[in-house]
């Protein structure tokens, strides 16, 4: 456990150094699987510039599938985001996760004048249910009324071949994180592989994350396409919980960055095989 704490602190401070602004009334949260994000992708200026453009429009972005052992690609992305930028980003990353030699990290990039991160939690997967344990952060933001809204963010990258079982276990992750952070306001997001051959339509009913409407609000629907390839699959999802948080939701969607930045499909695929998914809150 001590090793985990050291790794977390080495990536970013738990408390942002700047005061959190109340001037902006909206916050945009997103999740983006930057397919095999590491040394090779980080060495491509055009690709990194597109990634910079995408993330810079968010207040918090969960990045998944970070593969580089040294973590240099995360620092390189941070430098790009902050160069000549009026608003500065910071990031905090999980330990490297996975059962095999192919490890991955999650990282939350966030604007330091909009969001404060005050705690982190790596799910204690004592039964080894997850290939990559869900990784959560507790955030604080100020509303225009002067209140502090606390919300937990849980990032997941579900293993495709175990998608149904891992997604069924997400209810326990939600309860664990909710209790640890002492808030019902939760956002669960990431590449859940929750469609097509990995999760069949007949299997969705067994996953409370998408069906327990008293607890969860699943924003990205089954008919969405979150892939840049020729497939049509709603792999990436965002689920919101907590009435205090739900009432602030004003918009949510998949970001087609190819159309947004005039890219060819080949250029899109060079960035990722996934589109980001996002939700905007009005504070």
Image (cartoon, rainbow, N blue to C red):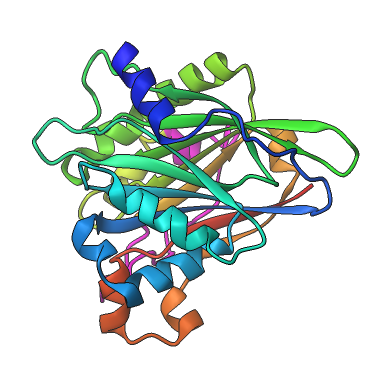
Q: Position of residue 168 (x, y in %)?
A: 34, 31
Quadrant (top left/top right/bottom left/bottom right) for the N terminus: top left
234 horizontally vs 186: left or right? left
Task: Report the residue at 21% width, 20% height from top.
Answer: 128
Residue found 66% across the figure and 41% down from its top:
115
Q: Nearer the viewer, residue 205 or 74?
A: 74
Q: Is residue 84 above or below residue 196?
A: below
Q: Which residues are magenta?
A: 208-234
Front one among 243 and 15: 15
Query: Most prominent secondary structure in the magenta stretch?
Result: loop
In depth, the one of 40 and 168 nearer the eye is: 40
Position of 275 with respect to 87 (left or right) is: left
Q: Is residue 236 above or below residue 1?
A: below
| Residue drawn at the location 64% of the way across and 22% of the way down | 183
Quadrant in the rendering for residue 232? bottom left
**Residue 218, relative to residue 141: is it above or below?**
below
Determine if residue 92 is in view. yes
The outermost residue toward the right is 145
Can residue 157 be seen here? The reply is: no
- Is 232 a magenta residue? yes
Indicate the position of residue 123 as horizontal and vertical percent values.
Answer: 37, 22
Residue drawn at the location 43% of the way across and 64% of the way down = 224
Q: Position of residue 97 (x, y in %)?
A: 24, 32
Q: Which residue is the extreme one toward the left?
A: 101
């Amino acid at each position: 456990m001590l090793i985990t704490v050291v790794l977390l602190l080495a990536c970013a401070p738990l408390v942002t150094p700047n005061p959190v602004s109340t001037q902006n009334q909206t916050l945009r949260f997103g999740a983006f699987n930057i397919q095999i994000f590491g040394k090779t992708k980080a060495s491509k200026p055009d690709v990194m510039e597109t990634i910079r453009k995408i993330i810079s429009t968010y207040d918090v972005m969960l990045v998944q599938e970070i593969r580089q052992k040294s973590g240099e690609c995360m620092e390189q992305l941070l430098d790009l985001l902050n160069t000549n930028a009026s608003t500065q980003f910071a990031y905090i990353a999980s330990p490297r996760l996975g059962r095999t030699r192919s490890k991955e990290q999650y990282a939350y990039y966030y604007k330091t004048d909009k969001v404060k991160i005050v705690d982190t939690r790596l799910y204690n997967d004592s039964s080894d249910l997850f290939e990559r344990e869900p990784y959560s952060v507790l955030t604080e933001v100020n509303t225009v009324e002067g209140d502090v809204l606390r919300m937990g963010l849980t990032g997941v990258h579900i293993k495709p071949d175990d998608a149904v079982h891992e997604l069924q276990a997400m209810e326990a992750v939600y309860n664990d994180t909710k209790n640890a952070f002492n808030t019902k306001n939760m956002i669960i997001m990431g590449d859940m592989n929750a469609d097509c051959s990995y999760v069949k339509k007949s299997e969705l009913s067994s996953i409370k994350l998408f069906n327990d409407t008293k607890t969860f609000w699943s924003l990205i629907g089954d008919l969405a396409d979150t892939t840049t390839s020729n497939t049509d699959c709603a792999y990436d999802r965002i689920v919101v919980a907590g009435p205090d948080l739900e009432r602030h939701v004003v918009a949510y969607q998949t970001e087609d960055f190819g159309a947004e930045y005039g890219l060819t499909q080949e250029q899109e695929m060079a960035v990722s095989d996934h589109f980001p998914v996002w939700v905007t809150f009005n504070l």
